[in-house]
Image: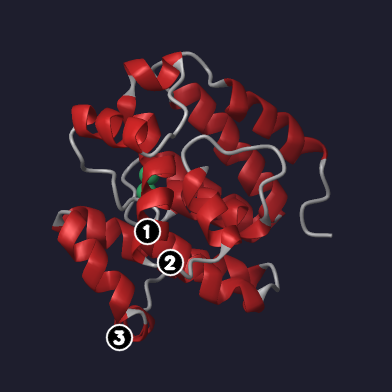
Amino acid sequence: MKTNYTEIDEIIYKYERYTKEIAKWLTHSKVQHSISTVSYASYIAKKIEKPHLEHKVVIAGLLHDLCRELPPYEMLRRAEELDIPIDDFAKHNPILLHGPLSAEVAKQIFTELDEEIYEAIYWHTTGKAGLKLTGLILYLADFSEPLRKYPQAEVARDILDTQGFQKALIYTVEQRLSLKKHSALPQTVEFLTWVKKEALLS
Ligand SMILES: [Fe+2]
Ligand SMILES: [Fe+2]
């Protein structure tokens, strides 16, 4: 996929409130990843003929990693403070909390944040059975945006173009389960069963 830089400039300008905020929280390379996720997520929204979701996927993509670079102890501290559930997986891998934390912090900063955007950010690392389309698009875009260095990203983009959204999503969830260093997260296993049987675009 070619990156359309004019489009990226437009996103940065039009969504300046959000891009300015993420620049306060993230290093340059994570800001680049977030913008690339946005650009690819908008491509997916158009590709699956849901252009009305573009606005939501842009905001979700920009904010999804807001808390990704906080130190692990700070993730745990903030999660406790915000009453975010901390299970054993998260206790040992606080990085797993960055989705819920980013969603909560984004909601505090941008109080008008839409529920579907909040949900997409909250679950972008693990996935969740029943996730709405904005969340599904973000999950796929986060894994396969063109700046990702691992070869599976290109495979996922290729599957989207040749076999469609659902197949690309199934591949992505399977890859994330197999790439995880720790044991498979129960939410992700349930998510995989769900994306396999559900008619996602109906
Ligand atoms: Fe993330
Ligand atoms: Fe990300």
Q: Position of residue 2 (x, y in %)?
A: 40, 71
Which quarter of the picture shows residue 22? bottom left
Label 2 element class:
loop
Q: Which mark is residue 111?
A: 2
Q: Amino acid at mark 1?
A: Gln
Quadrant position of residue 51: bottom right
| Mark nearer the viewer, 3 or 1 | 1
| Gap in angstroms between the C-alphas marked 3 and 1 | 23 Å
- Residue behind mark 3: 13
Residue type at tag 3: Tyr
Earlier residue among tags 3 and 1: 3
Q: Is any atom of residue 27 visible in this view?
A: yes
Please name whichever residue, 88 or 181, is drawn nearer the observer in this view of the structure: 88
Quick check: marks 1 and 2 in contact, CB under 8 Å? yes
Please tell me whether mark 3 or mark 2 is closer to you in this view.
2
Q: Count the marks: how many?
A: 3
Question: Taking 149 as reference, is 42 above or below it?
Answer: below
| Disc on res. 108 | 1
Can you see residue 37? no
Give the side of residue 199 with respect to residue 32, left or right. right
Locate the N terminus by quadrant: bottom left
Q: Secondary structure at mark 3?
A: helix
Q: Height in image: 179 above or below 65?
A: above
Residue at 32% of width from left, 55% of height from top?
147
23 versus 198 height, above or below: below
